[in-house]
Image: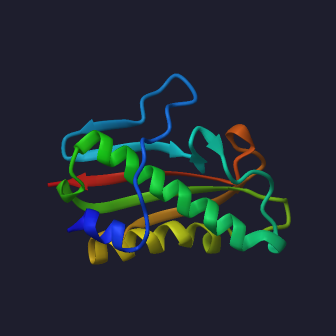
Amino acid sequence: MIEEKIKSIGIKLLNPPNPAGSYIPVVKSGNLLYVSGQIPMEDGKVVFTGKVSDANIETAQKSARVCAINILAQLKKELGDLEKISRIVRLSGFVNSVPEFTQQPKVINAASDLFYEIFGECGKHSRIAVGVSSLPLNSMTEIDAIVETK
């Protein structure tokens, strides 16, 4: 049902990005999965780069959505079946912002809204959304997640 929902909203889960450093993409501890920070990568390339300002919020929201899709791809690779997810527990969202930008929550809402659209009430989560001076590979956004499994 979850994967059918994902397909119905036009998302195709591809192979998730490989780690860009000395870490693993997902760590399982008990019934929690800790998904490492995902940047907006497609086909091995960062698709949204640069600083976020009031002038490009919509582009930054697209970037956050790609991060969320990459989180789903990592979970699919780890679990084999997204039906094993019982809840999205927490997201941490980082926005590569110009100093005067203060709408980081509005950017990360794109990821939060996607998880709610897919998982319903189980997609509601706690969250932080912060501005940072830079992100790996000059990506616009980076998001990590904590997910509970059945």
Q: Position of residue 68 (x, y in %)?
A: 48, 58
Q: Nearer the viewer, residue 94 or 74?
A: 74
Query: How many numbered discs?
Result: 0
Q: Residue at x 80, y 68 (%)?
A: 101
Q: Residue at x 70, y 44 (%)?
A: 135
Residue 64 visible to the viewer: yes
Q: Relative to 32, is 71 on the left or the right?
A: right
Residue 145 visible to the viewer: no
Q: Position of residue 53 (x, y in %)?
A: 81, 67
Q: Residue at x 44, y 71 (%)?
A: 114
Q: Position of residue 81 (x, y in %)?
A: 21, 51
Quarter of the view holding residue 115: bottom left
Up-down relation of residue 6 to residue 139 (above or below):
below
- Please identify the residue farthest to the left as the structure is shown: 150
Quarter of the view holding residue 89: bottom left
- Pick the quarter of the image with the N terminus: bottom left
- Pick the quarter of the image with the C terminus: bottom left
Q: Position of residue 133 (x, y in %)?
A: 78, 49
